[in-house]
Amino acid sequence: MDASKAAELLGTLKARFEKYPKRHQGITWPPVEARLKSSPKALDALLRMEESGGEPDLIAYDKASERYAYCDCSAESPSGRRSLCYDQVALDSRKENKPAGSAVGMALAMGIELLDEEAYRTLQGLGKFDLKTSSWVRTPEGVRSLGGALFCDRRYERVFIYHNGADSYYAARGFRGRLSF
């Protein structure tokens, strides 16, 4: 990433950091910025999150591991990451009307990971997300081995976890990612 693109991204991340202090209470911007500047892979992943509509924001700092965690905080599932089936196995199993890709594959290509159920619920504690859309979440192997996959949303002031065939895809279902560095 060139210097001007990095500076623009850092400006966006700083503005979002300042706009939503509830998401990262007790954390100050200067050490975050320093870590970001020294982490080109993290900046690349955050740029991909940003460009696909994720609006990444800092949501945690783990003192023990000294790692920051960014998560997609767009109000709805990121618009550039929708209409995807769950994973490559599901994509390969579709005979007709294949989606453009899979949530797991796209996350891997972006350098991020899908949220699991717990991380999704934690994110929902920081705001109200997916009121009109839904997001695939990392699915336990026991469910996946039977052909299913899990997704979540927020309706009626509650977070719901559902299941669907892993090969299904919908215009209103995408995925949220997390980057820890």
Image (tube, helix red, strand yellow):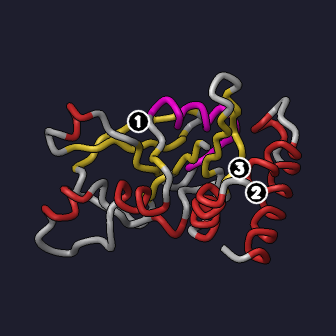
Alpha carbon separation for disc pair 3 and 2: 16 Å
Say whether residue 133 is left or right of residue 70. left
Mark 2 closeness class: few <14, some 14–19, many ≥20 residues within 10 Å:
some
Is 105 covered by the magenta stretch? no
Kindly report which numbered mark, 3 or 2, lies closer to the viewer in this rendering: 2
Kindly report which numbered mark, 1 or 2, lies closer to the viewer in this rendering: 2
Q: Tell me what residue is drawn at x 78 percent, y 36 percent.
A: 24
Kindly report which numbered mark, 1 or 3, lies closer to the viewer in this rendering: 3
Of helix, strand and loop, which one carries label 2? helix
Q: Which amino acid does label 2 sit on?
A: Lys
Q: Which mark is residue 161?
A: 1
> Disc 3 or 2, which lies upstream in sequence?
2
- In the figure, 41 relative to 80: above or below? above
Mark 1 closeness class: few <14, some 14–19, many ≥20 residues within 10 Å:
some
What segment is highlighted magenta in the picture? 117-130
Alpha carbon separation for disc pair 1 and 3: 23 Å
Could you tell me residue 144's position as x and y percent?
22, 40
Q: What residue type is labelled 3?
A: Asp
Q: Tell me what residue is drawn at x 31 percent, y 54 percent.
A: 86
Could you tell me residue 8's position as x and y percent?
79, 71
Could you tell me residue 38's position as x and y percent?
72, 54
Residue bearing mark 3: 57
Mark 3 closeness class: few <14, some 14–19, many ≥20 residues within 10 Å:
many
Of helix, strand and loop, which one carries label 1? strand
Q: What residue type is labelled 1?
A: Ile
Of residues 138 and 10, the one nearer the viewer is: 10
Of residues 9 and 75, the one nearer the viewer is: 9
Quarter of the image for the N terminus: give it: bottom right
